[in-house]
């Protein structure tokens, strides 16, 4: 899709179209690419967290049968704490999934450019770029978390200074409400901005075009130039919307399995749906990066 | 693109791109065209449902300040004494009838915008009044078809209930109902917008519009595309509903006034409706062009065979 090959630039809708078309036309190979990592991880997760999974599935089943008992469906139970197993699993996921994601990016870039990359060549290429992909992912997540923390802390300090200078009671109820709303909005905006930035940086690192910091810096320039910032934010919003709806639908499908007491079928359906969402996200990210690169080249020339 | 019917075929993503771009460039005229009829109706309906609005606003506010209550949202906003009554049925019927007028005005303005002409909401009213009856019938016919299909689904459930013990639980009925509703909405959305476009844009009669819409969306080459568009519309609606609730909750927390939250929610929902409506009309124009191309190809092949 590079400009020199003569293809036109894509709109946001066309990027999603292209990602879906790549996904459908290479369904088995791409699903296998990601599923090969997700399946063992999920099995391990299910086994380690088997007691909590059973409780969650039981609570969903109970809430479907008796909506009056929806209070039982408290997945965010305050008594629940992440134990050592959960932290290890999270760390393992952060290491494994960048490799799977890098494979998908390499495969998608090859497919979009008209090649048919083999699985082995994708794995080989992704494997060499793996540390970079992990670095980009961690730094971009850290950057966004830092942004949210900065907004929250700055606003908190500002409120305290304001209360002290005006001799008001510190952090009244209404100020606390406004604080929650401001932090929510900042989180929302940064989460939307993270998608195009992270997708571009991750794809650039996975395709071996830049190092970790170079990928992050160039992705920022490619996504948030004045002429292109709104487009990037629209892409981020679209991706969140698609992922949110996808996850909701996957849980609806899983809920049917739970309702007819086919727990294993429900787990398989949820796993397949989550795999396809992950494949779509990586494919759309790669297509967005290639398009952003083509736009940047066109602007430069 | 002055003549929308002469444009090249568009993919689903391009249809939504076009809808967003048309909506942003003509934000006020399109919002006015839809809102001038629908907003007064929503004000009346929200006032009639004011007890529910207060319960819902407090539930949304509670969830935003304490996300752990998200699972209890329906319990917090649900009134066990509230029962569906004849008054509710009459109100829904009135909403559908008035909604048909709003849809007529909106379609007349949208098609002018798509043709590159100046949108004129007030001059769209005579045309909308002319189409009103047909659009109202279309709304009721769609509702009837949905209910009929739903009844078919329930019949399938009863059949399964007899042969598969797992289906004899109340939770299986609830889950199947939810899944069936989503599936039916996805299947019917594309067909509804094609029938709506045929009536509102091309001034067809109900029977002819329904037949054409069915053919346009169920031709083998276009079937998966129609389903994809229907799913995208349902997804837009779900995301719109989630965000409108979030907007209501935030406004409620900031202004401490239920009315402010409800007003912002209704305005947000209006814009989601505008986006979905524009996407539906663009989809209809594209589907018509595609169907004509298929018909032409079939005609050419038959002529060649005859020669």
Image (cartoon, coloured by chain):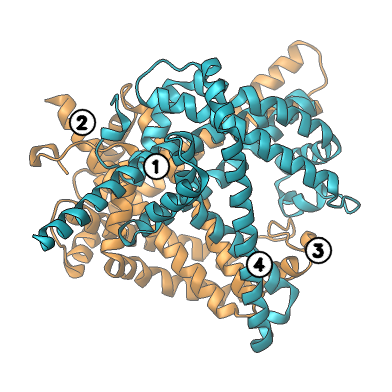
The CA distance from mark 3 to mark 2 is 54 Å
Task: Say which of marks 1 and 3 sits in front.
Answer: 1
Q: Which residue is mark 4?
A: B151
| Residue A63 falls left or right of residue B18 | right
Q: Are marks 2 and 4 in contact (CB under 8 Å)?
A: no
- Give the colour of chain B: cyan
What x and y, as percent, mark residue A48?
Answer: 56, 74
Q: Is disc 1 placed on a helix, strand or loop? A: helix
What's the mark number on residue A296?
2
Q: Which residue is mark 3?
A: A69
Residue B281, quarter of picture: top left
Q: Whole-Å distance between the Cαs marked 4 and 1?
A: 29 Å
Q: Are marks 3 and 4 in contact (CB under 8 Å)?
A: no
* Most distant residue in the right direction: B81
Whether residue A88 can be seen here: yes
Find residue B200 and report its horizontal and vertical position in percent.
Answer: 48, 35
């Amino acid at each position: 899709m590079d400009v020199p090959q003569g293809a036109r630039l894509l709109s946001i809708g066309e990027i999603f179209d292209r990602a879906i078309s790549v996904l459908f036309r290479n369904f088995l190979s791409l699903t296998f690419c990601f599923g090969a990592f997700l399946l063992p991880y999920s099995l391990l997760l299910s086994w380690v967290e088997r007691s909590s999974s059973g409780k969650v599935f039981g609570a969903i089943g109970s809430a479907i049968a008796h909506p009056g008992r929806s209070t039982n469906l408290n997945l965010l139970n305050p008594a629940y704490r992440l134990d050592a197993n959960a932290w290890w699993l999270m760390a393992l996921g952060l290491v494994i999934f960048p490799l799977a994601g890098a494979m998908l990016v390499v495969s998608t870039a090859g497919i979009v450019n008209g090649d048919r990359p083999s699985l082995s060549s994708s794995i080989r290429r992704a494997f060499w770029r793996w540390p970079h992909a992990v670095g980009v992912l961690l730094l971009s997540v850290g950057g966004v978390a830092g942004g949210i923390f900065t907004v929250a802390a700055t606003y908190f300090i500002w409120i305290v200074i304001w209360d002290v200078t005006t001799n008001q009671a510190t952090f009244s109820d209404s100020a606390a409400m406004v604080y929650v709303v401001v932090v929510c909005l900042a989180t929302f905006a940064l989460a939307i901005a993270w998608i195009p930035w992270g997708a571009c940086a991750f794809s650039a690192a996975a395709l071996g075009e830049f190092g970790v910091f170079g990928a992050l810096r160039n992705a920022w320039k490619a996504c948030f130039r004045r002429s292109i910032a709104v487009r990037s934010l629209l892409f981020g919003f679209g991706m969140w919307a698609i992922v949110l709806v996808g996850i909701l639908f996957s849980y609806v499908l899983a809920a049917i399995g739970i309702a007819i007491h086919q727990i294993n079928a429900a787990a398989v359906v949820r796993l397949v749906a989550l795999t396809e969402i992950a494949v779509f996200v990586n494919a759309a990210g790669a297509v967005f990066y290639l398009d952003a690169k083509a736009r940047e080249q066109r602007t430069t020339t | 693109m002055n003549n929308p019917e002469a444009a090249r075929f568009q993919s689903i993503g391009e249809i939504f791109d076009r809808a967003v771009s048309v909506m942003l460039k003509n934000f006020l005229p399109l919002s006015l065209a839809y809102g001038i009829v629908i907003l007064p109706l929503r004000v009346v309906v929200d006032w009639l449902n004011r007890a529910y609005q207060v319960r819902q606003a407090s539930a949304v506010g509670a969830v935003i300040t304490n996300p752990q209550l998200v699972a209890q949202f329906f319990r917090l906003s649900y009134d066990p004494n509230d029962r569906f009554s004849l008054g509710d049925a009459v109100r829904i019927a009135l909403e559908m009838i008035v909604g048909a007028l709003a849809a007529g005005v909106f379609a007349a303005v949208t098609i002018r915008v798509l043709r590159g002409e100046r949108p004129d909401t007030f001059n769209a009213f005579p045309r909308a009044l002319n189409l009103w009856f047909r659009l109202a019938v279309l709304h009721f016919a769609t509702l009837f078809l949905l209910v009929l299909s739903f009844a078919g689904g329930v019949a399938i459930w009863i059949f399964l209930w007899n042969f598969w013990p797992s289906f004899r639980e109340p939770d299986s009925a609830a889950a199947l109902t939810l899944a069936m509703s989503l599936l039916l909405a996805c299947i019917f959305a594309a067909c509804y917008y094609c029938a709506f476009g045929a009536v509102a844009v091309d001034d067809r009669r109900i029977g002819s519009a329904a037949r054409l819409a069915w053919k346009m969306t169920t031709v083998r080459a276009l079937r998966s595309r129609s389903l994809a568009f229907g799913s995208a519309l349902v997804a837009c609606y779900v995301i719109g509903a989630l965000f409108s609730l979030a907007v209501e909750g935030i406004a409620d927390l900031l202004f401490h006034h239920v009315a402010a939250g409800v007003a912002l929610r209704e305005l947000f929902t209006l814009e989601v409706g505008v986006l979905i409506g524009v996407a539906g009309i663009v989809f209809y124009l594209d589907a018509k062009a595609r169907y004509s191309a298929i018909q032409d190809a079939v005609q050419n092949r038959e002529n060649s065979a005859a020669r």
